[in-house]
């Protein structure tokens, strides 16, 4: 009677165990687990020593490390020669790893930029269609004020509200933070946001959508009516570009197009607050906003000219 065939998985396990024994790692079981999880991590024992050295360019890289360490094999070695060579070799491998990490980060940023660009183009096209189908005078004029933290957006919006009585849609992130402060406390909400970046972004976006839709609906039909937005749901595109975050799943073409179709004017304010003032504001409110510098300057003379600029054509949205 023929002996039962050994299962293939046991052959793989035995082979990996042999690799681990030959490699003599500090933590054999951890290395065994890595080899079992990734077959590409296993040494290719069929490869000759010469081919291995050529594939990794060992001779040239070693020569470069010797040169960087100031070591000439033909001369008397300096004190601590092996320590010097070790530091040079480790620096070379660290630089290579850093280069790969930077390249991966750049590739991801390019991918996000491409996705944002495609969404913006589609949203502008679809947004124009939605505006064309909307009846004249069926919605208010929407003015968005945006910019970095501490530039005076809220101060200016409140001033315009006091002067003209125009309704305000507050910044969605602040509304979300206040909700979390009430539920978790300032320290608790900061910890939650640090651990749940994506969930917080989703929360802010959905708050923004609800606020914006509600404000436009409630103020529709009023002749010459104006609604002020303190940021907008589309600001998330800027965060994706700056931080390299993937686009939020809720921010579909239709959602972005509806947001674009509501907006008549976007006013970008430049930096006016110091780092210390922003830090104090963040500490008082539980915010964790990083400092940003924008390139478009807008002074408070806007309060005197805003009623004139409202007659200008709608701008195309750009991230």
Image: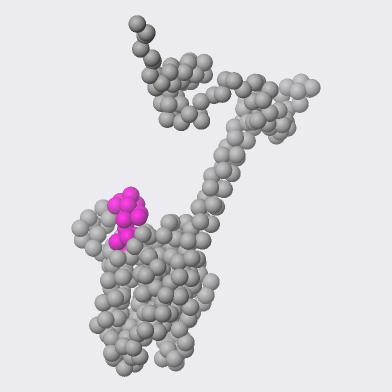
Q: Which colour assignment does the render follow? A: one colour
Residue 83 image point, x, y percent: 62, 25
Residue 198 image point, x, y percent: 35, 55
Q: Nearer the viewer, residue 272 or 164?
A: 164
Quarter containing the N terminus: top left
Residue depicted at x 68% and y 31%: 57
Q: Quadrant of residue 94?
A: top right
Residue 177 image point, x, y percent: 28, 62
**Tally of marks:** 0
Q: Is residue 156 left or right of residue 67?
A: left
Q: Looking at the image, can residue 285 be seen? A: no
User: Which range is magenta?
Assistant: 191-204
Q: Nearer the viewer, residue 179 or 102?
A: 102
Residue depicted at x 40% and y 84%: 132
Residue depicted at x 32% and y 58%: 200
Q: Would you say the magenta stretch is mainly helix, strand or loop?
A: helix
Is residue 164 depicted above or below 22 in this figure? Answer: below
In magenta segment, residue 195: yes
Residue reaching furthest top? 1
Residue depicted at x 47% and y 87%: 313
Q: Looking at the image, can residue 2 be seen? A: yes
Q: Nearer the viewer, residue 146 or 130?
A: 130
Q: Is residue 8 left or right of residue 103?
A: left
């Amino acid at each position: 009677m023929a002996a039962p065939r050994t299962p293939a998985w046991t052959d793989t396990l035995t082979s990996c165990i042999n690799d681990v024994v030959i490699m003599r790692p500090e933590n054999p079981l951890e290395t065994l687990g890595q080899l079992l999880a990734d077959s590409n991590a296993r040494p290719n024992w069929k490869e000759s020593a010469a081919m291995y050295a050529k594939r990794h360019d060992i001779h040239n890289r070693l020569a470069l490390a010797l040169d960087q360490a100031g070591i000439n094999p033909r001369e008397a070695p300096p004190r601590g020669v092996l320590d010097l060579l070790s530091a040079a070799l480790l620096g070379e491998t660290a630089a290579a790893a850093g280069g790969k990490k930077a390249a991966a980060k750049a590739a991801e940023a390019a991918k996000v930029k491409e996705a944002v660009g495609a969404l913006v183009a589609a949203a502008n096209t679809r947004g124009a269609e939605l505006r064309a189908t909307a009846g004249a005078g069926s919605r208010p004029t929407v003015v968005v004020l945006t910019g970095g933290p501490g530039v005076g957006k809220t101060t200016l919006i409140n001033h315009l509200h006091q002067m003209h009585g125009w309704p305000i849609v507050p910044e969605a992130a602040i509304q979300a933070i206040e909700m979390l402060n009430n539920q978790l406390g300032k320290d608790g909400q900061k910890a939650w946001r640090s651990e749940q970046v994506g969930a917080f972004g989703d929360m802010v976006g959905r708050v923004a959508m609800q606020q914006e839709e509600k404000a436009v609906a409630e103020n529709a039909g009023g002749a010459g009516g104006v609604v002020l937005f303190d940021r907008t749901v589309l600001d998330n595109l800027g965060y994706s570009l700056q931080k390299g975050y993937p686009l939020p799943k809720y921010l579909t073409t239709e959602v972005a197009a509806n947001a674009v179709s509501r907006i008549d004017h976007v006013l970008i304010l430049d930096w006016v607050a110091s780092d210390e003032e922003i830090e104090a504001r963040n500490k008082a409110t539980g915010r964790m906003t990083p400092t940003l510098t924008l390139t478009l300057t807008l002074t408070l003379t806007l309060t005197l000219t805003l009623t004139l600029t409202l007659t200008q054509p709608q701008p195309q949205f750009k991230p």
